[in-house]
Image (cartoon, helix red, strand yellow):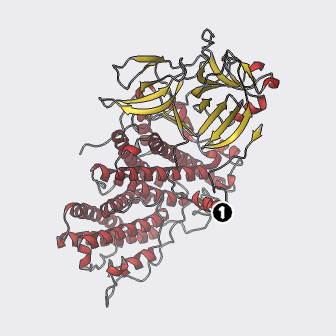
Amino acid sequence: MTPLTIRDVDRDEALGEALSELYGTTRAGFLRTAALGSAAMLATLLRPADAAAQVSDVAILNFGLRFERLQATFYTQAEEMGTIGRMKDAKQEWARTLGAHERAHVKIIERVLGPKAGPRPFFDFGEANETPAAFTRTAVAMEDLTVALLTGITPQVHDRGLISAFAGLLTVEARHAAWARHLVGAVPAPRAFDEARSIDSVRGAVDRTNFIVGKPKTGARRAPRYAG
Amino acid sequence: MTAAFAPRANAPGGEPAAQLGLPPPGVPAFTPGLPRRLGSTRHLSHWAPVKRSTPARSAPDRDAPAVATLATTTPEGTRNIVAVLARRTDRFGRPWVRVRLAELPNGTTGWVERAALGGYGTVDTRLDIDLSRLQATLYRAGQPVLHVPVGVGAPGTETPRGEFYVRNKLTRYRSPPYGPVAFGTSARSPTATDWPAGGFVGIHGTDRPDLVPGRVSHGCIRMRNEDILAVARQLPIGTPVTVH
Amino acid sequence: MQELEHVHPPGRWTRGRLLGAAVAGGAVAAGGAALAGRGGAGTSVAAPSRDTDAQILNLFLLLEYVQQDFYRNAAEAGSLGGELARFASTVGTQEREHVAFLSKRLGSRARARPRTDFDERMTAPDGFREAAVELEEAAIAAYVGQAANLTRGLIGNVAVLLSVEARQAAWIRSIAGVSPAPRAADPARKPDDVIADLRRKGFIA
């Protein structure tokens, strides 16, 4: 069985801008903005020793959110555009279920982060979710990558409540990955221990897909010259 | 399940009754809500930016004749976008997309290679322009959310009827005849073909609210300024516009 | 201008639905302190230690021993064929590796292998399928509950083992014809409950 991987393509410069959000704010920045919005969801500042940990947990959550948004959009778009409707029943059930799960993941992480959530990226999946075959190939690779990411970042999280939450998510993503593999005839659990990957490694893989792009410029500040 | 596997009678020894000393399970900081399947997609419309200049063909086939050439930018300097109508794969497995073009005659569609377009955008809004009632209705997820009176094309320079889409949005300009904000559509005035910027039908404000509603323009759809501002809050790029 | 009330899909804002939406939208830990830096949900929980590590790893080791025996027992009985047999063989090997890892990590503190005496119905295809699903799900729920209670260094090791348990669960569920991923997040279960359950169902003597 040939390994299924996300295609490597050249870097898109627009990614640099989009990814600058991933590094989180400075501690001072965090203190400045923590009072805004749904501060109840974020730590109080009563224990400054924890602030640095909170900042890095926020950065980790934001990377997780970015990745979940990518997946959620990939599945949702494929369903909205009709790619999933062209698949066999069993695969449709898989794809629709995963889309629903990823949307639920995005929603709750957005709630947790509140105003600290990074801006919604723009996506261009090109042909990857255009046909059932390309969709399936990409989804299998993406789900395995998600498992690698979550197993890699869960131990880096400081807050133990977050670790518990991540543990219950990584199992679901692992189920997704096994389910996808089963559908394409690959071994659902290929080894006794999964390969964990760091945020940097996963970020690199995502970069190479060129799925995250700059926002198309559809607005301008100039006087109209329409028909009138 | 448990009925099939009844407890073994008289099992000696075995595990201690409780795992003494184990901490209770950690409480997760968050729990996702119920996963929800997508509802009906019938109120959704899709659009895509033009990534590279490309011919739009009469059929999803590189050998089919070109109907028009898609540029990457609009006369306003914004990224050109197209409304996506259908998708098909050609005999080589290449994905193609049928799109609505901002070309004359109004209503022109063509097939372009998916690879020439960027990432899809999705909207659940729709703008309906009723030329007889001089009224615009904005729909969201199939429900009407705004009714506003409009000024439309005067006799001789009528606003074209048909299916169009919102292509760009202009702001921060000073041009009172256009009000505070203006949207460009894919519709073109058939009579303004020598207009420097292509004679596109816009949806915009006005410095003559007394003329709205009315048949007063060169084809554009005019709204009173407070109305265009209300509409602008709920009119994303790519929104389909039906003029009838 | 006549601004119509923003009309939502029917029923969305009825009181009943609002309450439903509150649950449907997900829950953030009570007290709001999702990132409090404390033991989750603002409660104070004893800090992880080498001692609790040992207890937790022994819980995991128990579960892996039981699974390993269960799969070996089924393979030896020889009643499985096709994909079920492949599943039992592959997963059995993986559970053996899990046992090896946990035992090694625990060293002299590793618990003894538990006594198991599986009902013969657990070796026939239908019984095996049901039992395998039960076992895998029990393990996942126990692991998910204890992951955050480990000292930091161990969490990473356990994470890449837990993900495989979840893959195994999804696999057997696929074979059994039930949804491999029934929920958006997997809940924890108390160790006592898991063990009592497994004992009651005849997995542990």
Is B41 on the left or on the right of B77, as rendered? Answer: left
For badge 1, the amino acid type reads Gly
Taking depth in this image into account, of A41 and A137 the one nearest to the observer is A137
Is C1 on the left or on the right of B141, as rendered? Answer: right
Mark 1 — on which chain does it sit?
Answer: C
Camera sees residue A19: no
Which quadrant is home to the N terminus of chain B? Answer: bottom left
Taking depth in this image into account, of B73 and C110 the one nearest to the observer is B73
Mark 1 element type: loop
Residue that lies at the very extreme toward the right in this rendered image? B210
Residue that lies at the very extreme toward the bottom in this rendered image? B10
Q: Position of residue B141 (x, y in %)?
A: 60, 44
Q: Residue at x 42, y 37 (%)?
A: A204
Q: Position of residue C127 (x, y in %)?
A: 28, 73
Residue marked by disc 1? C31
Q: Residues within 10 Å of mark 1 (few under 14, many from 20)?
A: few
Residue that lies at the very extreme toward the top in this rendered image? B194
**Rendering quarter of residue C167:** bottom left
Rendered view: C66 above or below A179: below
Which quadrant is home to the C terminus of chain B? Answer: top right
**Rendering quarter of residue B90:** top left
Rendered view: A7 above or below B55: below
Rendered view: C90 above or below A36: below
